[in-house]
Image (cartoon, helix red, strand yellow):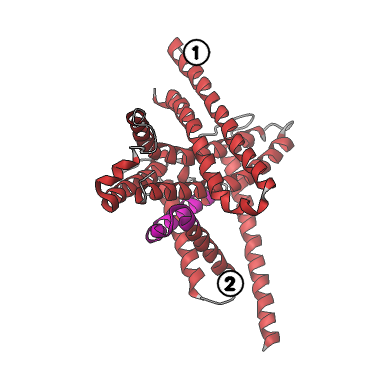
Amino acid sequence: MEGDIASMGQYIGAGIAGLGAGLAALGVGNVAGNFLAGALRNPSAAAGQTATLFIGIAFAEALGIFSFLVALLLMFAV
Amino acid sequence: MAAEQTNSGQANRGNSRLIAYALITVAVVLFILGLLDDYDGGLSISPMKQFEVVPALGGDMVHWYTVTNATLFMGLAILSVAALMVLGTRGRAIIPSRAQSLAELAYGFIRKMVEDVAGKDALPYFPYILTLFLFILFGNFLGLIPGSFTTTSHFAVTMVLALAVFVTVTLLGFIKNGTAFLSLFWVSSAPLVLRPVLAIIELISYFVRPVSHSVRLAGAITAGHAVMKVFAGFAGVAMVAPLAIGGMVAIYALEVLVAAIQAYVFAILTCVYLKDALHPHH
C-alpha cells in the first residue's frame, strides 16, 4: 500500500458519500412502494399516474445523485 | 394475387429472420472481441477503460476536428433516429409496417406525455422533446452493443443537453411571462414570513436542475456499464466464470430497461421544467 493521509481521507470521504446514494434508494423504494399500494387499491386510476410516479422517483433520486457527484469529485477532481 | 402476396410476405419474413440471425452473430462476435480486447490474462478488471475517448480513425492526437469514438456514435445515433423516422413514415400505410409502428409508437408516446405533463400549450415544443428523447434513447441503445462506445455516459454530453434545456426553458419563461416568471420563486401560498426563505430555496433548486438532470443520466449509464465490465472481469477466473456470465446476462437485461427509462425520465423532466416556464404560478 502506498499514498499519503490526504488521499486516504479522500477515499474514505468518497466511500461515505456513496452511502448517500444508497439512502436515496430508500426514498425511491418508498415512492414506488406507495404507488403500488395505491395502484392495487384502485387499479383503474393507476395508468394515469405513471408519469407522476416517474417524476416522483426522479426527484427522490436527485439528492442521491448529488452524493454520487460528491464521491466522483473526491475520487477524480480533488 | 393473394397467394403471391402471402408468398412474398413469407419470403420477407425469411429474409428478416436471416438478417436478425446475422445481426445476432455479429453481436456475439463483437462481444467476444470486446472481452478479449480488455483481457490481459488472470483477474484483470478495468471497468473505466470503455469510457475513454479515442480517435475513431487511428492516431492518438485529439484536435478539435478529430473524429473520436464519441463523435462517431453521436453521429450514428442521429443517423438511426433519422432512418427510423424517414423509413418509418415513407409508406404511410393504414396498416403500419414494423418500422412505421415503431416510429408511430415513439411519436404518440412522447406527444401524449407532453400533453399530459406540460399541458396543451406546450405542444409547439413537442418536436424538441421528441428529438431529445430519441437521441438519448438511441445513444443508450447503441452503447449497449458490445464493443461500442456510450456517448450518454459522458457528463460533457449530458451536460450540454441539460444546459440547452435549462437555457431554453428560462428564456421561454421570460418571453412568455415577462417578469411574472419570477413569481415561480415567490410562493404566494406560503405565509409571508416564510416567503423569502422559500425564495432562496427555490432559487437554489432552480439552478441545480441542470446538474441533477445531466448527472442522473450519465451516472446511471456509467454505473451500469462499469458493473457489466466488472462482471466481465470476473469471467476470467474459471471457478466463477459461469456465475459471472449469468450475472452479466441479468445485468445486461437490466441495462436495456435502464436505457429506456433514463431517456424517458430525461424527457419527462424536460416537460416538467417546460410546464414551470409556461405556468410559473404556484
Q: Secondary structure at mark 1?
A: loop
Residue on which disc 2 sits: B97
Question: Mark 2 — on which chain does it sit?
Answer: B
Q: Are marks 2 and 1 in contact (CB under 8 Å)?
A: no
Tell whether position A39 is magenta: no
Task: Give residue B117's position: percent from left, percent from top.
Answer: 47, 52
Question: Mark 1 — on which chain does it sit?
Answer: A
User: What is the chief secondary structure element of the magenta stretch?
Assistant: helix
Residue at coordinates 73% horizontally, 36% vertically from top-left? B243
Residue on which disc 1 sits: A2
Task: Give residue B26's position: percent from left, percent from top.
Answer: 61, 55
Q: Secondary structure at mark 2?
A: loop
Q: Horizontally, is B92 left or right of B155 in the view?
A: right
- The crowd level at tag 1 (other Cα within 10 Å; few <14, some 14-19, many 20+) is few
Choose between B262 and B113: the one closer to the eye.
Answer: B113
Q: Horizontally, is B206 left or right of B97 in the view?
A: left
Task: Give residue B167's position: percent from left, percent from top.
Answer: 31, 46
Q: Quadrant of the C terminus of chain B?
A: top left
In the rendered structure, which segment of residues is drawn in magenta?
B113-141
Choose between A45 and B210: the one closer to the eye.
Answer: A45
Vertical placement of residue B2 versus B12, above or below: below
Residue at coordinates 66% horizontally, 83% vertically from top-left? B5
Q: Amino acid at mark 1?
A: Glu
